[in-house]
Image (tube, rainbow, N blue to C red):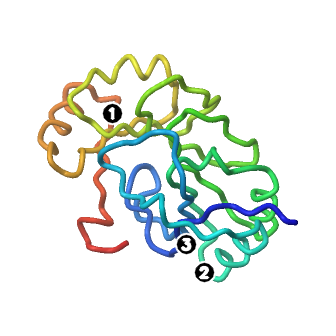
Amino acid sequence: MKKTYKVNEIFYSLQGEGYYTGTPAVFLRLSGCNLHCPFCDTDHAAATPMTAEEIADAVAAYPARHLVITGGEPTLQLDSDLLRALKARRFYVQIETNGTGKVPPEVDWVTCSPKEGPWRVDRIDELKIVFQSEDVETLVDLLPATHHFLQPCSGLNTADVIAYCMEHPRWRLSLQTHKLIDIK
């Protein structure tokens, strides 16, 4: 019997957050998470079991070859079997992780949006923090990354995030542009 993955949804849109904002991308949202964040936008009860080949075929039906794997927490399911199937279809693979799991080596770009430790992520390209007025400077030392983004929590504290970025210029503002322009 072939291994299956719990898929919440697959869709095509523009990346709305962080470094790749505006990039056409296929989104693979996996179900299941080890954390329970109050602002999470994933229905973890919704899951369709799919094999690696079924997933790779479904995402390859779209014209873009930038794939964003998100969740839930993708490192709970993501493995080399699925990534090899995606790489065989020429995908550039970005994941959005909470940092509590190890990232398989086939992943091209790691966006870490940490919520609580302990963290097991061993490489981070982009640190994206949903800002809630906490001290984020200690996270920079704990989770070294090339790029640093702060994102308002559900758009409710945008002025606070802007002020923080202005006072701490290593941080860049990341808005959920997909919500601002009303796309998925």
Quickly name the residue at label 1: 171
Up/down of 23 relative to 163, above or below: below
Please state the horizontal and vertical placement of residue 15, each as a whole percent of the image: 44, 63
Q: Which mark is residue 149?
A: none
- Residue type (three-letter) at the residue carrying disc 1: Trp
- Residue type (three-letter) at the residue carrying disc 2: Tyr
Quickly name the residue at label 3: 10
Q: Is residue 82 left or right of residue 165?
A: right
- Real-space Cα separation, disc 3 to disc 1, in angstroms: 31 Å
Up/down of 45 relative to 157, above or below: below
- Label 3: which secondary element: strand
Of the residues tagged 2 and 1, which is closer to the observer? 2
- Label 2: which secondary element: loop
Quickly name the residue at label 2: 62
Residue shown at the point (33%, 33%) measured from the top left: 171
Q: Is residue 62 left or right of residue 12?
A: right
Badge 3 local density, few (<14 within 10 Å), some, or many (20+)? some
- Real-space Cα separation, disc 2 to disc 1, in angstroms: 33 Å
Q: Is residue 4 left or right of residue 22?
A: right
Residue that sits furthest to the right in the current view = 1
Please state the horizontal and vertical placement of residue 7, each as a whole percent of the image: 59, 65
Up/down of 58 relative to 111, above or below: below
Q: Earlier in the sequence, mark 3 or mark 2?
A: 3
Of the residues tagged 3 and 1, which is closer to the observer? 3
Residue shown at the point (87%, 66%) measured from the top left: 1
Residue shown at the point (15%, 42%) measured from the top left: 157
Residue that sits furthest to the left in the current view = 159
Q: Quadrant of residue 88?
A: bottom right
Q: Earlier in the sequence, mark 2 or mark 1?
A: 2
- Label 1: which secondary element: loop
